[in-house]
Image (tube, grey):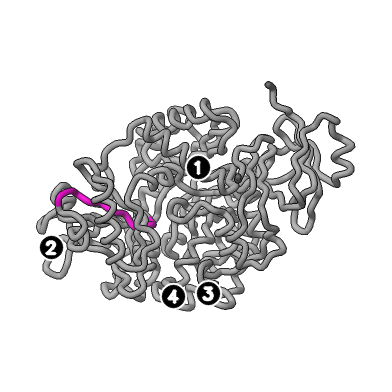
Amino acid sequence: MKKNTEKIICNAKVYVRRGEFAQAVLIRGGRISAVGAERDITAAASPHSERIDAHGRLVLPGFYDSHLHLIGIGRMAHVINFSGFSSLGECIAYARAEIACKKPPPGIIRGDGLNQETFITEKRFPTRDDLDAITVEQPLFITRVCGHIGFCNSAMLELLGIDGSSCGYRSLYRRGYEPPCSFAEGAERDESGRPNGILRGACLAQAREMLPAETDDMLRDNLAYAMRSALEHGVTAVGSCDIIQAHTFQRIVTAYRAIYDAQTPNVRITLQNGVADDPDYLDWYIQNGYGTGRALEQSYLKIGALKLFADGSLGARTACMKHPYRDDPSGGYGVPETDWALLRELIKKAHKNGMQVIVHAIGDAAIEEVITDFEALGDPRNTLRHGIVHCQITDTALLSRIARNNLLAVVQPIFLANDLYIVENRVGAALASSSYAWGSMERLGVRASYGTDAPVEPINPLYGIACAVTRKDLTKNYPEHGFYPEECVDVYTAVDNYTRGGAYAHFDENRLGRIKSGYAADMVLLDKDIFTIPPHEIPSARVVWTMINGERVFERL
């Protein structure tokens, strides 16, 4: 039976733009035909139109998460998940129970999501001795929630060939050095010189390379799981960083195509592709025509920006800072993820070949370096829409340069829910007051797009909206007035940056991100009006249904 291609969403509160709402939407052939008063929409529609009663509830454009990792979301369902624990002891007990219950096959046991900042007392990284308490029989490899630092037991160290005479960790960014210009080695040692199981840089990359490869079926299942999770939370389009190395490109694209062949419509994907610091990968993208904007699957899958890395994370103290971390006795400034001279060359080559570039940069030194690299391109209008991902630790001068150069800020407000407890200790109150500066970005006219970096944080956009509006720990409603509340934004701004902002960042602003005539009928119905309820209640709102191209692809039972 052929589906009815004309529908009316009626009895609704339809968000049109700041301060403006409609009552109904007319959909024809998967696109929005008209938006307005219910009486007018009904008069314009066929008498045979399917009517979808919203029961007076709020209809928003489908959320556009501007940066996440769909493969990572799927993989989290198949590893030991260490997120949410309040002590290292709890992590160890949980992992031992999981291994005893699931009896993993021989080989490396994988874990992810650990965040020492959620521990109530001893907020430290686990060492090999801690992980040996979980298992000594199999190699165990865990990554912190940020993905920029890893932890392994003695069996994993042996597998990596790391002993007291090899691969000692050294920060390449210490007092007296210029910003880093080569890759960190990365195996940390204790005071006696013994590797302690904490890995960064090249050693972390080496550990990842030793993990067993996913089968094609596993890859497809992980992506499908992640896309279902996105739809459940009203996310209809994403910028997904799944491809770090070009040699994985065809397998991942094939997996996406198989999902679309089996189930359409589905989440719209813009691929943010990396090069793993090897310039030959960029040449491969260019030579094969995989530049920004190339469609790979009708209107659902396309190539987006080249994704590069300047530094690590604040939680792991690997974000590159202009001044030493205040809570690091060793006086570290952070650790680069890419040689900065190579980073500049990759940005120049991509720009020359018409490719959009987005760069992971969290610390103020890394952000300054990336701004300088973009300024050197000589394109103050930023026609290719280059941007900075995360863009966390900033001062007024950096924010002004971002605005002056029309750079995108691809930010994750939900990060502050945890980071508000550590940022002042890491960088001091003065710099903390001008960081995570979403209010200043809006006042300066910076083009911002919101997202989650899932699985680093939950994929639920309502958490990010609430955090942007309140600047609080969402579970504790702390601090009372928000963390430097002058950097709060209102709900309109947060919603726009989670819809129109994501669309603009991916060159989709003329077809996605708004409920407007001519746009794709991608919408979400919420059970609460987030414009009128108290902001601390926003995370409790739930998606009733999610629509893509006029078809409901998720409905809550």
The kind of residue tagged 4 is Glu
Give percent across and percent down for residue 254: 44, 28
The kind of residue tagged 2 is Arg
Question: Residue tagged by mark 1?
Answer: 305
* C-alpha separation, residue under disc 1 versus residue under disc 3: 36 Å
Range covered by the magenta-colored residues: 137-146
Residue 483 vertical placement versus 453 (above, below): below
Question: Which element type, helix, strand or loop, lies under badge 1?
Answer: strand
Question: Within the image, what quadrant is residue 36 found in?
Answer: top right
Magenta span has 140?
yes
Q: For the residues labelled 1 and 2, say whether their Cβ atoms are less than 8 Å apart.
A: no
The image quadrant where one finds the C terminus is top right
Q: Is residue 530 left or right of residue 222?
A: right
The residue at 58%/28% (across/down) is 298
Question: Residue tagged by mark 2?
Answer: 194
Question: Residue tagged by mark 3?
Answer: 478
Neighbours of disc 3 within 10 Å: few (<14), some (14-19), many (20+): some
Question: Residue tagged by mark 4?
Answer: 424
Give percent across and percent down for residue 403: 60, 59
* C-alpha separation, residue under disc 4 versus residue under disc 3: 15 Å
Give percent across and percent down for residue 333: 34, 67
